[in-house]
Image (spheres, rainbow, N blue to C red):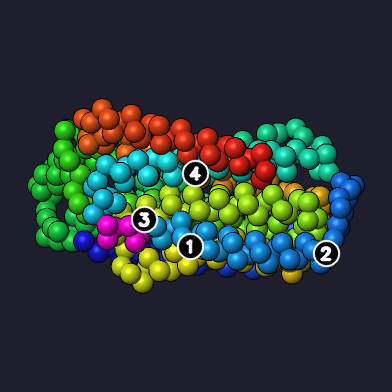
Amino acid sequence: MGTPFLRCDLSLYKLFACLFIFLVLPSFVLGDCTCDIEDEERNKTEALKYKLGAIASILVASAIGVCLPVLGKTIEALRPEKNIFFIIKAFAAGVILSTGFIHVLPDAFENLTSPCLNENPWGKFPFTGFVAMMATIGTLMVDAFATSYYTKFHFSKAQPGKNAGDEEMVQQHEGHVHVHTHGTHGHAHGAIPSADSELLRHRIISQVLEMGIVVHSVIIGISLGASESPKTIRPLVAALTFHQFFEGMGLGGCIVQAKFKARVVAVMVLFFSLTTPVGIAIGIGISNVYTENSPTALIVEGVFNAASAGILIYMSLVDLLAADFMNTKVQTNRRLQIGVNIALLLGIGCMSLLAKWA
């Protein structure tokens, strides 16, 4: 069942967020250096070659990663209802969870606890944890309100002439059909969620997850593009290429389950694939005036990294892992249950190893 208002609201949200990230964020990270920069071997010409190579490799890896699940739905074995899909999605969810905990959150702590920032207030309050917590709660609220809006919209269309006496019947129907889907699909009254309700959940998940990924992808892209040290850039290129590939697989799996129209799928795939390369291009453009240790740059990057970490951790645990691990198909199949747990640990392990180079 269509939800035009919800799609419009989410699309406008993504549009404004995209404009803010690409147009406003770069201006925030420009500033005068107030803290000594670490001595690095700088070679602007050689660094530019690595940056251009990074744009190409990350673009290709991102596109392949996000497209694999999308194109895989034409292959019988990779359809969402098949066991292998649960295993692939668990691996990708592990990648996203590790990205939040191992890659993004530590960067946020490093930014917001830097000695380059004033002791008051940055040294007297745990801003990183606070921002991550608020981003997690904000994601939960968006999740809940969007689902609530759809439920009311659905019943107002289905029963336009209902009177007060029908209210109890509608509430009972809501309790049986539109149930909370985090972790325990259909636990309320033993009912199974309707197809429309499930579809809405997957669409919300895919769009919120993409926004969380986009935020930190732009930041790491700008950081790489602004660096002039080949020694720093070389390992980052390989690490970010694998990072974007696996992260794309996770997002692609969510897009497949959302069953968007081809045009929307193409936009989401393109949006994800271009985010980090565009961030690198922005970083190259501002490299002459960008100072990574300026207070403004540290605060902006730290806040965005913390918010991104909160979103990614919530989405991976609540909307991806809990939902699939408590799915009836997984719960009643011991081999599949073991498989998804192993895949989760492998995904976490792979991204944790990349932290050494990233």
Cα–Cα gap, marks 4 and 2: 33 Å
Residue 71: say if magenta: yes
- For the N terminus, the quadrant is bottom left
Task: Answer whether labels 3 and 1 touch (C-beta < 8 Å).
Answer: no
Looking at the rendered structure, the secondary structure element under dot 1 is: helix
Residue farthest to the bottom, as pictured: 263
For marks 4 and 2 on the same chain, the one whose residue lies earlier in the sequence = 2
- The residue to which callout 4 is attached is 96
Residue 63 badge: 1
Q: Choose between 222 and 118: the one closer to the eye.
A: 222
Looking at the rendered structure, the secondary structure element under dot 3 is: helix
Residue displayed at 65% across by 61% down? 54
Cα–Cα gap, marks 4 and 3: 16 Å
Query: Which amino acid, mark 3?
Result: Pro
- The residue to which callout 2 is attached is 44
- Residue 263 in the figure: left or right of residue 46: left
Residue displayed at 40% across by 32% down? 342
Relative image position of residue 350 (x, y in whole percent): 53, 39
Judge whether 94 appears above or below 40 on screen. above
Q: Is residue 174 visible?
A: no
State how many labels appear: 4
For marks 4 and 3 on the same chain, the one whose residue lies earlier in the sequence = 3
For marks 2 and 1 on the same chain, the one whose residue lies earlier in the sequence = 2
For marks 3 and 1 on the same chain, the one whose residue lies earlier in the sequence = 1
For marks 3 and 2 on the same chain, the one whose residue lies earlier in the sequence = 2
Q: Choose between 355 and 209: the one closer to the eye.
A: 355
Magenta residues, start to end: 69-75
- For the C terminus, the quadrant is top right
Looking at the rendered structure, the secondary structure element under dot 4 is: helix
Query: Which amino acid, mark 4?
Result: Ile
Query: Which amino acid, mark 2?
Result: Lys
